[in-house]
Amino acid sequence: MATKKLRVWTGDEDRARIAIVAGMERVKWADVVEKLVEEGFPERTTKSVRNRHLRWRTYEEARRTGALGRGTNRCRTCGLDMRGHVCGGVNGPNAANVEACVVVGDPD
């Protein structure tokens, strides 16, 4: 079974993909691939184009909301990282002292 050599995505290709998807009411990834090829970009699989777009959209959403670089394992009460964290929240072990959130040890 021959494997294809992976090509690096270029900025122009990303911008074209974003513009194509933005102009579509309902995205069909095969049509996106076809339009990219028509614009002179190398042919890619529909899965690679879709995955690239979804990763980009996830990144943009995280950047827009300020969650970029934050892990998802955070306390729902105070927002601190859960690693080494003992929360004084409503249902936490330190529920009597709600203001007290303690990080045990170095989280990094």
Image (cartoon, helix red, strand yellow):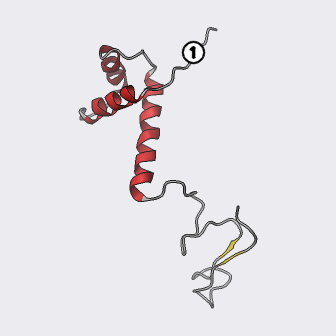
Q: Residue at x 37, y 21 (%)?
A: 33
Relative vertical location of residue 45 with respect to residue 85 in this rendering, above or below:
above
Residue at point 40%, 30% (across, down): 11
Question: Residue 85 occupies which quadrant of the picture?
Answer: bottom right
Residue carrying label 1:
5
Mark 1 Cα within 10 Å, few/some/many (few <14, many 20+)? few
Residue 21 picture quarter: top left
Residue 39 position by quadrant: top left
Q: What's the residue type where badge 1 is placed?
A: Lys
Residue farthest toward the bottom in the current orientation of the protein = 96
Quick one: which residue is furthest to the top in this view? 2
In the image, residue 24 sits, relative to residue 60, either above or below, namely above
At numbered mark 1, what does the secondary structure look like: helix, strand or loop?
A: loop
Tell me residue 96's x, y (percent).
63, 91
Q: Quadrant of the C terminus?
A: bottom right
Residue sticking out furthest to the right: 105
Q: Is residue 91 left or right of residue 10?
A: right
Seen at 58% across and 86% down, the residue is: 98
Residue 84's place in the image compared with 53, above or below, is: below
Please name whichever residue, 16 or 31, is drawn nearer the observer in this view of the structure: 16
Residue at x-position 48% and y-position 58%: 67
Quadrant (top left/top right/bottom left/bottom right) for the N terminus: top right
Left or right: residue 54 versus residue 19 is: right
Horizontal side of residue 51 vs 98, given as left or right? left
Residue 75: percent from the left, percent from the top?
A: 58, 69
The percent coordinates of residue 99 (x first, y second) are: 58, 86
Image location (x, y in percent) of residue 34: 33, 17
